[in-house]
Image (tube, rainbow, N blue to C red):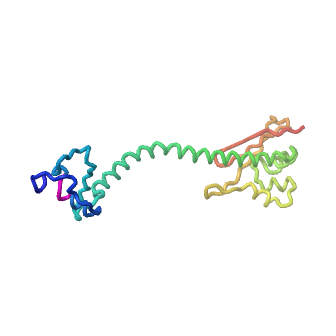
Amino acid sequence: MGQNTEPKKLSQIPELEDQELERFWEEHEPEDFEGWKENDLKFQRPVQKKDSTSESGFTLIEIVMAVLLLAIAIAPILAAFKPALFATSGEEELSVFTHRARGTLNRLMTFDFQVHQDYLDAYGSTVDLEDFFEVAGAEDPSDEAGKETFPFKGDSYTPTVTITDQSSGAGGLLEITVTVANVSVQTLKAEY
């Protein structure tokens, strides 16, 4: 109990401001008052003040442990995503190279069969695009050939083109193959 053993009456509690009331309850206990029951008396114990030397927060050890646990938990998650990231990068490369090879092939297919046959007869199966566009009658063969070169991830790529006779010597059927890096697309061109 509090300082006096003699019970006091609730009516003896003076009207006080908040700070004074807080000090009052620090010096007295509700049990010191006659007729006190926890449910009858609207009493709320004041929050105990901490020493000015104690501060709330986390210690360095707690922070280090939390970071360590996070690192241990995140490492396997990142390892699980690694193959997907590499696969996506490889698929992007495959997609870009395939698209560019098909574009070059489609551009070459716009020329008549005879242009392809003339190039094969004059230069052989490995195509130099500048020479091809010269045979095709382009105004600026160098500029036309330059349109096929493209940058990707810091490197420059130029398609490699080959024209081969697929007619077994009878003539009239050529195979055109366009290769960009590790991607090749091909088609047949017939004389009709």
Residue 27 lies in the magenta-colored region: yes
Q: As displayed, is residue 21 above or below residue 80? A: below
- Give the x, y percent position of residue 149: 71, 56
Q: Nearer the viewer, residue 93 or 35?
A: 35
Q: Which residue: 23% across, 65% down? A: 52
Q: Residue at x 26, y 62 (%)?
A: 16
Stretch of the chain drawn in magenta: 25-29
* Quadrant in the picture for the C terminus: top right
Residue 26 x/y as whole percent:
20, 58
The residue lying furthest to the bottom in this view is 52
**How many circles with numbers are drawn on the protein?**
0
Residue 48: give x, y in percent of width and height: 23, 57
Give the residue at the far left of this rendering.
5
Image point (17%, 51%), residue name: 33
**Magenta residue check for 7:** no
In the image, taking residue 10 as reference, residue 88 lies left or right, namely right
Q: Nearer the viewer, residue 8 or 76?
A: 8
Q: Position of residue 78 (x, y in %)?
A: 45, 46
Main secondary structure along the magenta-highlighted residues: helix
Answer left or right for 148 relative to 122. left
Quadrant in the picture for residue 185: top right
- Outermost residue, right side: 192
Residue at x 80% of width, y 55% of height: 131
